[in-house]
Image (cartoon, rainbow, N blue to C red):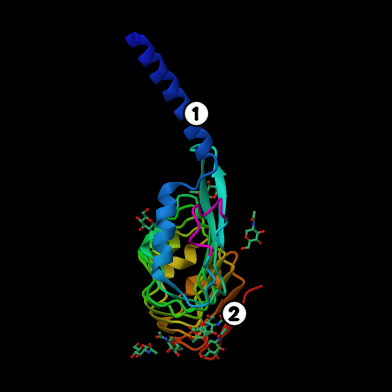
Amino acid sequence: MPRWRFCLTGIILGVLSCHFLQLASAQMTDPFEVDALQAVRRALKDTGKNLNSWKKTDPCVSNWTGVICLMDPNDGFLHVQELRLLNMNLSGKLAPALGLFSQMTILNFMWNNLTGSIPKEIGNLITLKLLLLSGNQISGPLPDELGSLSNVTILNLDNNNISGPLPKNFANMTSARHFHLNNNSISGQIPPELSALPQLLHFLLDNNNLSGYLPQEFSRMPNLRILQFDNNNFEGVLGTADCKELFLI
Ligand SMILES: *[C@@H]1O[C@H](CO)[C@@H](O)[C@H](O)[C@H]1NC(C)=O
Ligand SMILES: *[C@@H]1O[C@H](CO)[C@@H](O)[C@H](O)[C@H]1NC(C)=O
Ligand SMILES: *[C@@H]1O[C@H](CO)[C@@H](O)[C@H](O)[C@H]1NC(C)=O
Ligand SMILES: *[C@@H]1O[C@H](CO)[C@@H](O)[C@H](O)[C@H]1NC(C)=O
Ligand SMILES: *[C@@H]1O[C@H](CO)[C@@H](O)[C@H](O)[C@H]1NC(C)=O
Ligand SMILES: *[C@@H]1O[C@H](CO)[C@@H](O)[C@H](O)[C@H]1NC(C)=O
Ligand SMILES: *[C@@H]1O[C@H](CO)[C@@H](O)[C@H](O)[C@H]1NC(C)=O
Ligand SMILES: *[C@@H]1O[C@H](CO)[C@@H](O)[C@H](O)[C@H]1NC(C)=O
C-alpha cells in the first residue's frame, strides 16, 4: 500500500475524531467541575441519603440532585450555575473546592447541619449573586476574601456559630442588598467603612457579640431600611442606649 494512503486515512480519522469530540462536549459537564463536585461531596456527610444521585457519571447530564447547570457556548461544556442543597440533612464541611466553579451564581446550603468554617476560596466565585448558608453550625471567622464578591446581592449567614470580626473589606461587596448575619458570635467593632455600601437595604446583626459603638455614618446610608442590632455588647447606640432596631423608611 503506498504511503500516502496511510496519511490520508490518518487525516480522515483525525478529522472524524475531532468532530466526535466536539459533539461529545456539547453534552458534558466541564471535567474540571466534575472533579470539584466530587471534592465537595467527599467533605459532606449525607446521613439522609439525599445525594445518592451524586454517583452517576455526569453531574449535569445525569441530573445530580441540587446541581443546576448551564451550557457555555464559548467552551461547549455544561457548567454548574447553582448548588441548591437547602434542607437536605447534610453534615460535614464546605470544601475549599467550592471556589473552583467559574460560573456559579447561587450557593445554597441553608438549614443543614454543616460544621467547620467558610472556605476563603468561596471569595474566588466572582460571578456569585447569592451566598446562602443560614441555619447550620458553621464556626470560625468570616473570610476577608468574601469582600471580592462584588456581584453578591444577598449574604445570608445567620443562625450559625460564626465568630471573629466583621471584615472591613466587605465594603467592596458593592451590589449587596441584604446582609443577614444575626444569631452568630461575631465580635468587635462594626467597621464604619461598611456604611459606604451603596445598595444595602437590610443589615441584620442582632444576637451576636459585637462591641464598641454603632458608627454614626449608618444613619446616612441612602437605601438602608432595616438595621437590627439588639442583643450585642454595644457601649452606646446612636445616643439611645435602649434602641434595638432602626426602621429608616
Ligand atoms: C437527619 O439525620 C439524622 C442523623 O444525623 C437523623 O436522625 C434524622 O432522622 C435525619 N432527618 C431527616 C429529616 O432525614
Ligand atoms: C432532575 O431531577 C429532579 C429531582 O431531583 C426532577 O424533579 C427533574 O424532573 C429531573 N430533570 C430531568 C431533566 O431529568
Ligand atoms: C441536625 O442533626 C440533628 C441530630 O443529628 C437532627 O435531629 C436534625 O434534624 C438535623 N437538622 C437538619 C436541619 O438537618
Ligand atoms: C456582575 O453582574 C453584572 C450585572 O448582572 C454582569 O453584567 C456581570 O457580568 C457580572 N460580573 C460577573 C463577574 O459575573
Ligand atoms: C452553636 O451555637 C449554638 C447556640 O449558641 C449552640 O447550642 C451549639 O452548641 C453551637 N454548636 C457548635 C458546633 O459550636
Ligand atoms: C477593596 O478592594 C481593594 C482592592 O481591590 C482594596 O485595596 C481596598 O482596601 C478594599 N476596600 C476596603 C474597604 O477594604
Ligand atoms: C436568635 O437568637 C435568639 C437568642 O438566642 C433567639 O431567641 C432567636 O429565636 C434566634 N433567632 C432565630 C431565627 O433562630
Ligand atoms: C463576647 O465577647 C467577650 C469579649 O468582648 C468575651 O469575653 C465573651 O466570651 C464573648 N461571648 C461569646 C458568647 O462569644
Q: Name the residue under label 2.
A: 246
Q: Is residue 211 placed above or below 62 in the rendered structure?
A: below
Quadrant where the image shows the C terminus: bottom right
Looking at the image, is mark 1 or mark 2 earlier in the sequence?
1
Amino acid bearing label 2? Leu
Amino acid bearing label 1? His
Residue that protrudes farthest toward the bottom in the picture: 242
Residue 114 seen from this side: yes
Residue that protrudes farthest toward the front in the picture: 1
State the predominant SS element of the stretch in magenta. loop
Residue 71 lies in what quarter of the image?
Answer: top right
Residue 76 seen from this side: no
Q: Is residue 129 placed above or below 14 in the rendered structure?
A: below
User: In the image, which residues are magenta?
Assistant: 53-62
Residue appearing at x 41%, y 56% in the figure: 36
Q: Which mark is residue 19?
A: 1
How many residues crowd around disc 1 within 10 Å: few (fewer than 14), some, or many (20 or more)? few
